[in-house]
Amino acid sequence: MAITNHERVGKALELLKTGVLPFIERELKAKYGNAWAFEVKDILADTRLAAGKGESLQDVAASLVVMDRKWGEVFRQVLGKSERSLVNELLAVRNAWAHQEPFSSDDAYRALDSAGRLLAAISAPQADDVEKMKMELLRVRFDEQARSEKRKSASTAVESGVAGNLKPWREVVMPHADVASGRYQQAEFAADLWQVHLGEGSDEYRDPVEFFRRTYLTESLQAMLVGAVKRLTSGGGDPVVQLQTNFGGGKTHSMLALYHLFSGIA
């Protein structure tokens, strides 16, 4: 199961807590001796971290707060300004993590990098584990970017191929002469069975020879015509034919085919 960025940051904070705790205790003992625990308790007394934790420093936030507030007296002796900036930044990261705020890949990488830098500054072995997490996150980001670029390239190739190979429909489809000349009448576009019965209308609908010359006999149309002949001759075929088409004019065209088939004119 894929790990989320929020979970990555949580693991990094856990490693940070484990790594800085011995360092903090060592430096506080060097400064305050056996009274170091009382110093920690006094620092955390006015924070939410005091309840139930005391001097234990079992929350990474408590460790970072102690480092921040005792920086001048204790930690500036062994760490520099950049490390204090890391402490403050990691405090903000911990608060965002505790409040379930989302972390982008960039945000998560920065959090891991800051934790790793602070751990490396105090020579904590956990720095190596955080470094591995950074490399894993970079690999995941690289794979995501590679897949995204592949999808973009495939989409671009399809679009460019279509655009390069297909001609505009105006260059492929030639309109009828009446349409091209402007003599087109919309009423003549659709077949009219009654008009054909009266012997009126255009030849392509009225004349059986012209009608069948211009009509493509689809499989369903052929089956309907054969069934109709069987019904009127040998007794086979369906007594009722339900006409269904996905386009306008198809049903009328089918009835015209039946009309011309049995008109006896052709």
Image (cartoon, helix red, strand yellow):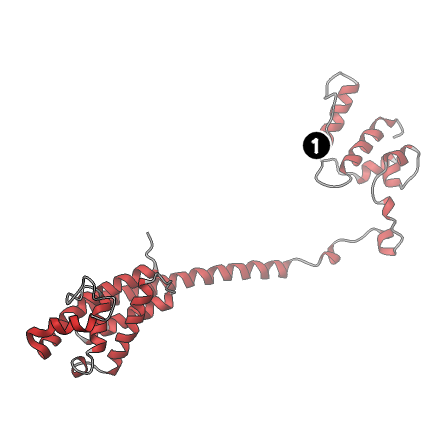
Q: Position of residue 173 (x, y in %)?
A: 75, 53
Camera sees residue 128: no
Q: Is residue 225 above or below residue 44?
A: above
Give the labeled residue for mark 1. Answer: 220
Q: Is residue 191 left or right of residue 83?
A: right
Residue type, label 1 = Ser
Identify the element where label 1 is drawn.
helix
- Which residue is the extreme one toward the left? 34
Residue at 74%, 35% (x, y): give it: 217
Q: Position of residue 123 (x, y in %)?
A: 16, 73
Camera sees residue 114: yes
Q: Is residue 120 above or below residue 4?
A: below
- Count of all numbered marks drawn on residues in the image: 1
Instruction: Please tell me in which quadrant of the rendered image residue 138 appears.
Output: bottom left
Q: Nearer the viewer, residue 95 or 51?
A: 51
Instruction: Please tell me in which quadrant of the rendered image residue 67 appears.
Output: bottom left
Task: State the quadrant of the C terminus.
Answer: top right
Q: Position of residue 50 (x, y in %)?
A: 20, 66
Q: Is residue 148 left or right of residue 240?
A: left
Q: Is residue 167 above or below residue 93?
A: above
Q: Position of residue 164 (x, y in %)?
A: 63, 61
Q: Nearer the viewer, residue 236 or 247?
A: 247
Q: Is residue 5 above or below residue 22?
A: above
